[in-house]
Amino acid sequence: MRNSVRVELTNKSEKPVLVGDATALRGKPKDDCVGPGPAAVLQPGERLVDQRPGILSPSMKVFVSVFTGEKTCKWVEVARKP
């Protein structure tokens, strides 16, 4: 376990990506991912680095909300580095 969580999210697509909230859980979130709406726009090749205090155990997964429209999104699991 660590005392802080660092997330690096890179847009490897050819189009901009709208991202919102991120969460760490043991399974995929069941709640609505819209929350306050998109928080960042990642252009192709851009990277978002977010570091927050908190605990991330090996059994937890990290999910980020990815928007396909202003109020349409889905939770996507973020791959973890060893």
Image (tube, rainbow, N blue to C red):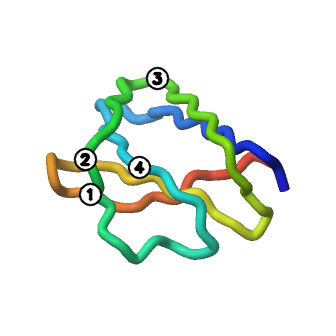
Residue at the spot of label 1 = 34
* Mark-to-mark CA distance, 4 and 2: 8 Å
Q: Which mark is residue 10?
A: none
Which secondary structure, mark 4? strand
* Mark-to-mark CA distance, 1 and 2: 5 Å
Task: Using a 10 Å C-alpha cutoff, classify the residue at mark 2 as few (fewer than 14 neighbours), some (14 to 19) or many (20 or more).
Answer: some
Residue mark closest to the camera, 3 vs 1: 1
Can you give x and y, in whole percent of width and height, for residue 43 in the image?
35, 24
* Mark-to-mark CA distance, 3 and 4: 20 Å
Q: Amino acid at mark 4?
A: Asp
Q: Which mark is residue 37?
A: 2
Residue mark closest to the camera, 3 vs 2: 2
| Of residues 31 and 10, the one drawn nearer to the viewer in this rendering | 31
Residue at the spot of label 3 = 45
Can you give x and y, in whole percent of width and height, for residue 23 in the image?
52, 57
Q: State whether residue 29 is above or below residue 36.
A: below
Tell me which corner region of the image, top left, top right, bottom left or bottom right, holds residue 72.
Answer: bottom left
Q: Amino acid at mark 2?
A: Gly
Which secondary structure, mark 2? loop
* Mark-to-mark CA distance, 1 and 4: 8 Å
Residue at the spot of label 4 = 21
Answer with left or right where residue 77 lies relative to residue 6: left
Answer yes or no: do the residues labelled 1 and 4 have beta carbons within 8 Å? no
Q: Amino acid at mark 3?
A: Gly
Picture residue at 73% right of the left edge, 43% below the top:
4
Tell me which corner region of the image, top left, top right, bottom left or bottom right, holds residue 75.
Answer: bottom left
Answer with left or right where residue 7 lies relative to residue 39: right
Say whether disc 4 or disc 2 marks the residue closer to the N-terminus: 4
